[in-house]
Image (cartoon, rainbow, N blue to C red):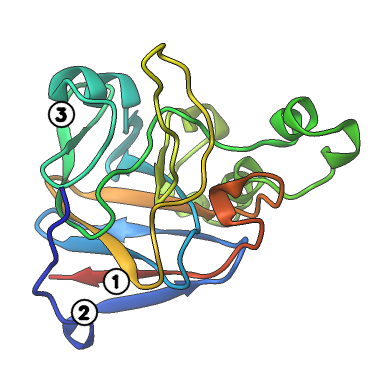
Amino acid sequence: MTIASNRRAENAVSRHLIDAGDHYIGPVQAGQTIRIVDVDGNEAADTLFFNADDPSERYSCMDTVREQGQVYLTTGSELRSNLNNVMLTITADTVGRHDTLGGACASESNTVRYDLEKRHMHSCRDNWMLAIANHPEYGIDKRDIAHNINFFMNVPVTADGELYFDDGISGPGKYVEMAAAMDVVVLISNCPQLNNPCSGFNPTPLEVLIWD
């Protein structure tokens, strides 16, 4: 369900541009609101959330899908943890739906999906590993990397229950906005994938804004 926000960018307490194919890691406090913007459109924001006080509590696709009885994420979706606690709630969304089933690209999946020669290509898992290695202060280990959300990514579920990667339904300047119910750390890979439509075969920037 698409709902626009009345928050103004100039009132944000934090703004950060994530370059094409790059990553972002940072805190969001309970009561704050975070917006992720698809700056040029048709980009994928592969996103993970962790309890800032205990990263072993993290976003769970399974708990989120089960509790809301819906496979897509949009306005009103409660993003739940592996302890079934609400971490954030989507309060505005100008796209209409987001994927949490398709997973993230890795060198191994690039090899299986595309070609052995694609193994060396940069991936979302590489982005996440680099972010947590460069920021040990958040206490996140590679074993904490689990289910993710693919904001702006279009992964339709067919009547037969099959998944496929399709052209994006986002566009320049579209965004998703979430209110944090607990102190969280957000980890985003701006997907560098060139071989499927999730980045429009041409990765472009994302922006993160936070309001008190």
Name the amino acid type tagged 3: Asn
Nearest to the observer: residue 173 or residue 100 = 173
Quadrant of residue 55 within the rendered picture: top left
Residue 120 in percent (x, y) is at 84, 44
Instruction: Residue at 91% x, 38% y: name it.
Output: 117
Residue 34 is marked as none
Q: Earlier in the sequence, mark 3 or mark 2?
A: 2
Name the amino acid type tagged 1: Leu
Query: Mark 3 near mark 1, Cβ–Cβ under 8 Å?
Result: no
Q: Earlier in the sequence, mark 3 or mark 1?
A: 3
Q: Determine whether the residue tagged by mark 3 lies in a helix, strand or loop.
A: loop
Residue 85 is marked as 3
Label 3 and label 2: CA atoms lie apart by 27 Å
Q: Where 77 sits versus 93, above or below? A: above
- The outermost residue toward the bottom is 10
Q: Residues within 10 Å of mark 2 (few under 14, many from 20)?
A: some
Nearest to the observer: residue 11 or residue 150 = 150
Quadrant of residue 80 within the rendered picture: top left
Q: Determine whether the residue tagged by mark 1 lies in a helix, strand or loop.
A: strand
Q: Is residue 98 left or right of residue 168?
A: left
Instruction: Residue at 14% x, 65% y: name it.
Output: 4
Q: Residues within 10 Å of mark 3 (few under 14, many from 20)?
A: some
**Disc 1 target residue:** 209
Residue 12 is marked as 2
